[in-house]
Image (spheres, rainbow, N blue to C red):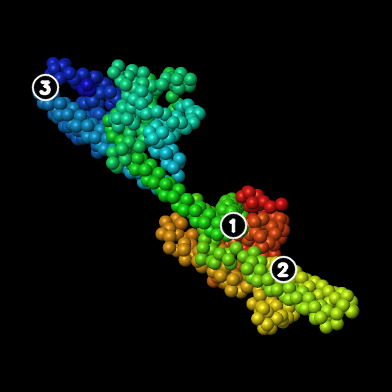
Amino acid sequence: MQTLTLIHSDVFPIAQYADALGREAIAPRQISTLENLGADHNALRVLLVDPSIGSNGHAPGSIDARTAVVGLGLTEQPKWLSDDSVYFDLPENPSSTVLLNTVRRAYQFLFQKQRADQLDRQLADRTRELREVSQVGIALSTERDHSVLLTKILSKARELSRADAGSLYLLDDDGNDGRALRWKLAQNDSVDVDFEERVLPITKKSLAGYVALTGETLVIDDAYDLPHDAEYSINRSFDEENSYLTRSILVFPMTNHVGEVIGVLQLINRKRTAAKTTKLTAATVPDEVISFDKEIVEVMRSLAGQAAVAVENNLLYESIERLFEGFVTAAVTAIEQRDPTTSGHSFRVADLTVELARVIDRDSERYANVHFSSDQVREMRYASLLHDFGKVGVREQVLVKEKKLYPLQLETVRARFDFVMKAVENRANERKLAQLLAHGPDGYEAFAKQVDKETRAELERLQKDFAFIATSNEPTVLPEGDFQYLQQLAQREYDDIRGSRSLLLKPEEAKILSIRKGNLDAIERGEIESHVTHTYNFLQKIPWTKDLIGVPNIAYAHHEKLNGRGYPRKLMAQDIPLQSRMMTVSDIYDALTANDRPYKRAISTDRALDILKMEVADGFLDPTLVDLFMDAKVYERAGVLRT
């Protein structure tokens, strides 16, 4: 109960008012000057100012919101009063009733003013807390990293409640068609916590388990003095091992929008002040720790509701990401099964491009103004993984073509040569039979030897020609002389099975075998190059989220060259996104060093880097990116090193 003090001068006739003041439990106190007023923080008080102490014009040494001033016989209101001062004016010698009523009114006014100030402070505190809870809710709703989200939830709960320590639990499947409590996080400002995530059974024996099962909120003022009928208990081993003392505890459920408990928050030891530098010990806890009051419990319940929604949304977001990641992996796997020769290529390109992005982020000279967010890196990764998905629209025989001629085409040519060689043998036998029938055995042996010699020479020439065709069928650079010889072969004729004259090597076969470099003709190369457009058309149909909206365009430009000689749009340097340029470097490097391409031999990393530099010299690739790729040894960082 608050007391009231009546302060008066040493000349004031206090004795004549003593009985009245005594009945009201008002304690008088005498001063000689206002400078001796002093401070009294534990009581409301009324200061009687008469001419003996009020005429010198000096302000009191201490006057605050708990002090009211009553002027007795003053000609004017004291000039040292502030605008907020409580002031009453009385004649010099008031009656006991008048003085008592005035003092009582002053007391009531002070009490009401104090109460109003208290309510204002409480309102300001609640407003601040609600604003902070709202800000926390906004922060939680935008956080995508699950571990960061949980850390933020517990940290904000402790910050708002001034809790020294806390833990966060989530309900999870135990792997046996049941539910378990997963202890995800622990924090303590006073003790270094050596925490390791673990799974706990859900029972009423633990505080968190009790709340998870019942959905109730536990407010414990003294953890060492639990109700005798409590089903739960606390584990004192942590306190004993760390010279800590757990006193006040607040344990409350995180409940989703349908009323299901998805987690539990446990706060320990609410501090009197929010000073984070104050470290609690078993000795200081009794003085520094207070209970969790009703107001903070309500604030924490509000926070828990927002936290539950944020956790559920985050888990849903993660599940959607896993679903999409699975779809991307399945799509890439499906494409690589159509073209086993490029197995793993898309994943390696993604690893190389992401690693190059990390290197660029750390480069403070060449790319000082370029910084990729985690979302942008993820966007690049998906674009890299899916950059060849358009191969689904390319004929499989073109996609997996190893030589210049398709296997069936080469077998047809081989069969034609076999037929001609058999025809040569048949003609030789016919000549020998005719000789024998016409001339008998005379001179037959010499004639037969000559025919056999001519036949062997012709067969050897045919075998050599087919071997030349088989060599020309390889996807290597065709020398000029070989090209001329192919043209000669394309003009050679033979008698087919119907007796008609036919070409030994068909014009379309000769044309394909005459491909100067590689194994694809113009039509096939155009079909292969069309995979970029197919990729773009496919990716455009996916309703990408805002943070991944650039995936189609990044993938679309991965075969463009800075000098406009790329495909399919022949973009110039300024029109090619940086992410696409990065992917192009990664794509070329992996294509050069891959050891699973049957149409070419893998080359070493050093040779591949030389080719990248040649591409730069020809104006195809970004020189700064290639330099960074080589200087930072991105291929080593990404684990794509070929020796």
Q: Secondary structure at mark 1?
A: helix
Find residue 96 and name its label: 3
Q: Are marks 2 and 3 in contact (CB under 8 Å)?
A: no
Name the side, left or right, on which 175 lies relative to 558. left
The mark that comes first in sequence, 2 or 3, is 3
Name the side, left or right, on which 366 lies relative to 160. right
Q: Cα distance, mark 1 to mark 3?
A: 109 Å
Q: Residue drawn at (43%, 24%), measured in percent from left and top? A: 280
Viewer-nearest of discs 1 and 3? 1
| Residue 459 image-quadrant placement | bottom right
Three-letter residue code for mark 3: Ser
Q: Above or below — where is 366 with respect to 488?
A: above
The mark that comes first in sequence, 1 or 3, is 3
Q: Residue drawn at (45%, 52%), measured in percent from left and top? A: 324
Three-letter residue code for mark 2: Ala
| Residue 492 image-quadrant placement | bottom right
Q: How many residues crowd around disc 1 within 10 Å: few (fewer than 14), some, or many (20 or more)?
A: some
| Residue 109 image-quadrant placement | top left
Q: Residue drawn at (48%, 20%), measured in percent from left and top? A: 241
The mark that comes first in sequence, 2 or 1, is 1
Q: Cα distance, mark 2 to mark 1?
A: 24 Å
x, y (%) of residue 330?
49, 53
Q: Which residue is mark 1?
A: 340
Q: How many residues crowd around disc 3 within 10 Å: few (fewer than 14), some, or many (20 or more)?
A: some
Residue 273 in view of the camera:
no
Three-letter residue code for mark 1: Pro
x, y (%) of residue 384?
54, 57
Q: Nearer the viewer, residue 443 or 81?
A: 443
Q: Which residue is mark 2?
A: 470
Q: Nearer the viewer, residue 534 or 382?
A: 534
x, y (%) of residue 212?
34, 31
